[in-house]
């Protein structure tokens, strides 16, 4: 949540001489706020807390592309492997988290990598609000079986269909 | 994004669905393009053009968030096997 606070500050109080750069950093930071939330939750669910440093080490193995693919799977009609694990389907809150992740990741890519990217403050605020809503949705759904499947898929989703 | 230079199936239907979505004042549907996302996966990029609202950025952000939701909801009926991205560009002042 601290990163979202930083993102909002960058959007609301951009430095005058670097207005576009501040908004781009805001968009990027917004994405990373949600990325780190999900990675932290996955690691806390899947990895022992000892020895010290183990969770931190595992956190660095998560791959942006693989997380996005998993989010795509949870945003669309489920494939057979996931359907077997999620007989009740994907809760709306979890679907929202997954959809938001994909949207923010694409925005981050443009903000960080496209030299022609230009944005305005309301677009940055929109993405911050989108992420904040996903944070709230995650708090509501995080204790569910479906969330456990989602977090496990974030780590192993690339090898899910084996 | 890498835009693929051909017309993809469903484009007309997508256009119909998105035309029916309510848009805030000053917002118009700008483009629907098929291409690849940052990881090379097939994706649909829906872009709206927006009149900047310097007097009330927060209100505009709230309106645009609703537009993101409504747009994703509208296109979900097609169940397309692509990522769908909603983006915005500011109209020239």
Image (tube, coloured by chain):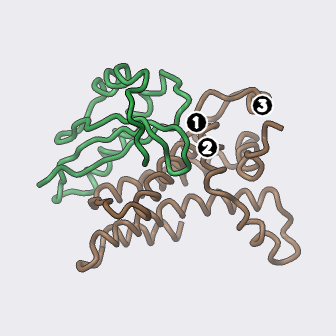
Chain colours: A brown, B green
Q: Is residue A26 left or right of residue B29?
A: right
B36 vs A140, nearest the viewer:
B36
User: Label 1 to label 2, Cα distance in Å?
Assistant: 6 Å
Chain letter belonging to callout 3:
A
At x 28%, y 56%, the residue is A122
At x 33%, y 28%, the residue is B18
| Residue designated by label 2 | A71
Secondary structure beneath disc 1? helix
Q: Are marks 1 and 2 in contact (CB under 8 Å)?
A: yes
Quadrant of residue B63 within the rendered picture: top left
Crowding at mark 1 (Cα within 10 Å: few <14, some 14-19, many 20+): many
Residue extending furthest left? B93
At x 23%, y 78%, the residue is A16
Crowding at mark 2 (Cα within 10 Å: few <14, some 14-19, many 20+): many
Chain letter belonging to callout 1:
A
Q: Is residue B93 above or below residue A144?
A: below
Residue A138: give x, y in percent of width and height.
Answer: 60, 50
Residue extending furthest front? B5
Query: Disc 2 or 3, which lies upstream in sequence?
Result: 2
| Residue designated by label 3 | A81
Image quadrant where one finds the N terminus of chain A = bottom right
Tag of residue A75:
1
A18 vs B5, nearest the viewer:
B5
Q: Is residue A129 left or right of residue A35?
A: left
User: Label 2 to label 3, Cα distance in Å?
Assistant: 15 Å
Q: Is residue A133 above or below residue A81?
A: below
Crowding at mark 3 (Cα within 10 Å: few <14, some 14-19, many 20+): few
Do callouts 1 and 2 point to residues on the same chain?
yes
């Amino acid at each position: 949540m601290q990163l979202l606070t930083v993102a909002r500050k960058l959007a609301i109080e951009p430095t005058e001489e670097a207005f576009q750069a501040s908004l781009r950093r805001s968009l990027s930071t917004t994405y990373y706020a949600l990325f780190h939330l999900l990675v932290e939750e996955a690691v806390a669910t899947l990895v022992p807390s000892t020895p010290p440093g183990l969770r931190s080490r595992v956190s660095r193995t998560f791959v942006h592309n693989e997380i996005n693919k998993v989010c795509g799977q949870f945003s669309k009609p489920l494939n057979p492997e996931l359907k077997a694990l999620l007989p009740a389907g994907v809760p709306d809150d979890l679907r929202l988290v997954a959809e938001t992740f994909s949207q923010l990741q694409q925005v981050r890519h443009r903000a960080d990598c496209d030299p022609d990217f230009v944005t305005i403050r309301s677009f940055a605020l929109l993405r911050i609000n989108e992420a904040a809503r996903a944070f709230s949705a995650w708090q509501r759904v995080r204790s569910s079986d479906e969330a456990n499947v989602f977090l496990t898929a974030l780590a192993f989703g690339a090898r899910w269909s084996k | 994004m890498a835009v693929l230079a051909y017309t993809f199936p469903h484009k007309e239907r997508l256009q119909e669905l998105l035309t029916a979505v309510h848009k805030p004042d000053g917002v118009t549907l700008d483009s629907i393009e098929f291409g690849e996302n940052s990881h090379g996966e097939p994706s649909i990029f829906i872009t709206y053009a927006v009149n900047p609202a310097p007097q009330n950025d927060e209100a505009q952000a709230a309106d645009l968030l609703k537009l993101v939701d409504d747009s994703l909801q509208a296109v979900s009926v097609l169940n397309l096997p692509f990522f769908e991205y909603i983006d915005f560009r500011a109209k020239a002042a």
